[in-house]
Amino acid sequence: MHRSSILEMDINTPGLRKLQGRNQLKDLVEKVQAARNEMQWGEEVLPPLLVKIAPDLSKLRLLSNWMV
């Protein structure tokens, strides 16, 4: 059975933008990765996780929220 080749999280919608902070996103990504890792993928490689964020964030906010 063919599974998805990529998993996408779109947190650029009203109500979800509050999840774009460093701690909130870290928690969310860890939960999604754990769920992905528990799924049966057979011999397929785990699909990468793509996180879509707001395109209007300033460069400074991006750096302060996302650089680890």
Image: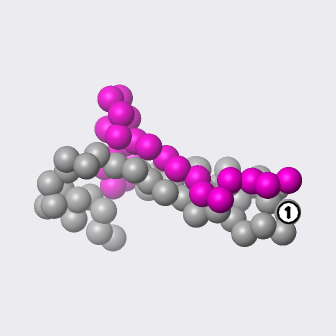
Residue 61 as seen in the image, left or right of residue 26: left
> Is residue 1 something that shows in the picture?
yes
The one nearer the camera, 58 or 31, is 58
Q: Quadrant of residue 49?
A: bottom right
- Identified at 33% across, 55% down, the residue is 22
Numbered-mark total = 1
**Residue 40: where, in percent of width, then height?**
82, 55
On-image quarter of the C terminus: bottom left
**Figure coloring:** one colour
> Is residue 64 something that shows in the picture?
no
The magenta stretch is: 1-24
Q: Farthest residue toward the top?
A: 15
Residue placed under numbered mark 1 in the picture = 42
For label 1, the crowd category at 10 Å Cα-Cα, with few meaning under 14, some 14 to 19 and many 20 or more, is few
**Residue 19: where, in percent of width, then height?**
37, 42
Residue 17 sits above or below residue 47 on the image: above
- Identified at 70% across, 59% down, the residue is 37
Residue 10 is covered by the magenta coloring: yes
Residue 42 is covered by the magenta coloring: no
**Residue 62: where, in percent of width, then height?**
23, 59
The one nearer the camera, 2 or 17, is 2
Residue 44 sits above or below residue 30 on the image: below
Q: Tag 1: residue type?
A: Gly
Q: Farthest residue toward the front?
A: 2
**Residue 53: where, in percent of width, then height?**
34, 49
Residue 6 as seen in the image, left or right of residue 20: right
Local secondary structure at mark 1: loop
- Identified at 68% across, 53% down, the residue is 4
- Identified at 22% across, 65% down, the residue is 63
